[in-house]
Image (tube, helix red, strand yellow):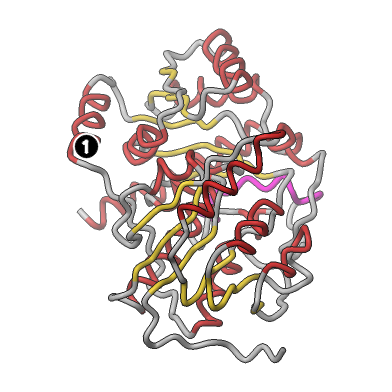
Amino acid sequence: MAETGLRFPEAREIGILMLSALGDAVHVLPVANALRRAYPAARITWIVQPVPHRLVAGHPAVDEFVVFHRRRGAAAWRSYAELRERLRGRRFDVLLALQVYLKAGLIAAMAPAAVKLGFDRARARDLNWLFTTHRIPPRPVRHVQDQYFEFLEYLGVDPAPVEWNIPLSDAERAAQAEFVAGLDRPAAAIVVGTSKPQKNWAPERYARVAAALERDFGLRPVIVGGPSAAEAAIARTIERTSGARVVNALGDDVRKLVWLLDAARIVVSPDTGPLHLARALDTPVVGLYGYTNPKRYGPYRRFTEFVVDGYAREPGEDYPPSMEHRADGMARVTVDAVLAKVELALRTTEAKRGAAG
């Protein structure tokens, strides 16, 4: 089949298939916004899992969210049966199959769509190309956000301007204002956990950064993230050893995470969903990279100068974007390098704030 691109000038039903995770959901939002601009009359439906749904629910670019409640083991089939029932009677003009795991492929196979657009064979893991009718052309490895924009390009949709548009409700703004009023100084959000232990940073190094944020930069360290036992353990180490008056704001409220990151003067984070969420909210973020490649997974087109690059095996290494993991990389992320980037971020953003004000 020739890969010539598709045009849907009269599209009425558009589906987006991206189940997880939080960072991927953030990357989908500019795609949804671009589709809304290109097809203002279309009905846009996003098939998603519960956690990222809590982030994007009610987003103005999406008309409907179909939540996939995944069960495990012998009951897994019921999850797919329930989803099939939810989609009964629907017919998408085009389904964007943005995720390449097998569970997403099975959903793409059952989704009622005239066109199921997915990745080329080289990038479609788990044989996902078998579940799509059309595939975007092969490309070299790129930033994840640019990779998703290839779907728009194939449809003739301009991704610019790149917008996330994550609104806060009046109640969330009120909760945010109450939290900020309870602090004696601006917040510095510290993200301490990821879904992969190899991306995590040493707790004692976080503790030293927290101490410096308070002592040297006049900020209040606020630990943010999820409810996992690993994150709780890191938080306890920071609280016990940093000597700083740390605020522990860990929890499972995704929307609270949004307004915490939005309120922060700066964010310090490894490669995980909250880093990309901070970027989307335009909050300066110091990214800690070692295991994953920042040219593929770093903050998109902004705050890249604040990345601490432990992925490079030596300073200035000219590596290309890739999916290669470097198991020893996070050990190369030093406290001094992080604090230097914190200073740069605060100096740069304060200068811009002053110029704007």
In the image, residue 311 lies in the stretch drawn in magenta: yes
Residue 199 makes an appearance in the image: yes
Image height check: is 293 above or below 242? below
For the point 43% across and 46% down, which residue is it? Answer: 284
Image: magenta residue range: 303-314
For the point 36% across and 77% down, which residue is it? Answer: 12
Instruction: From the viewer's side, name the closer residue of 105 and 301.
Output: 105
Image height check: is 17 above or below 207? below
**What is the crowding at mark 1: few (fewer than 14 residues within 10 Å), some, or many (at least 20)?**
some
In the rendered structure, the answer to whether residue 297 lies left or right of residue 279 reads right
Image height check: is 88 above or below 176? below
Instruction: From the viewer's side, name the closer residue of 250 and 185.
Output: 250
In the rendered image, residue 269, in percent from the top left (x then y), is placed at: 55, 38
Provide the secondary structure element on which disc 1 rests.
helix
Instruction: From the viewer's side, name the closer residue of 299 and 57.
Output: 57
In the rendered image, residue 27, in percent from the top left (x then y), is placed at: 50, 57
In the rendered image, residue 256, in percent from the top left (x then y), is placed at: 35, 32
Quarter of the rendering containing residue 338: top right
Residue at image mark 1: 173
Q: Name the amino acid type tagged 1.
A: Arg
In the rendered image, residue 58, in percent from the top left (x then y), is placed at: 31, 50
For the point 76% across and 60% down, which residue is it? Answer: 125
In the image, residue 309 lies in the stretch drawn in magenta: yes
In the rendered structure, the answer to whether residue 85 lies left or right of residue 350 reads right
For the point 63% across and 55% down, which residue is it? Answer: 104
Instruction: From the viewer's side, name the closer residue of 108 and 293.
Output: 108
Marks counted in the figure total 1
Residue 305 makes an appearance in the image: no
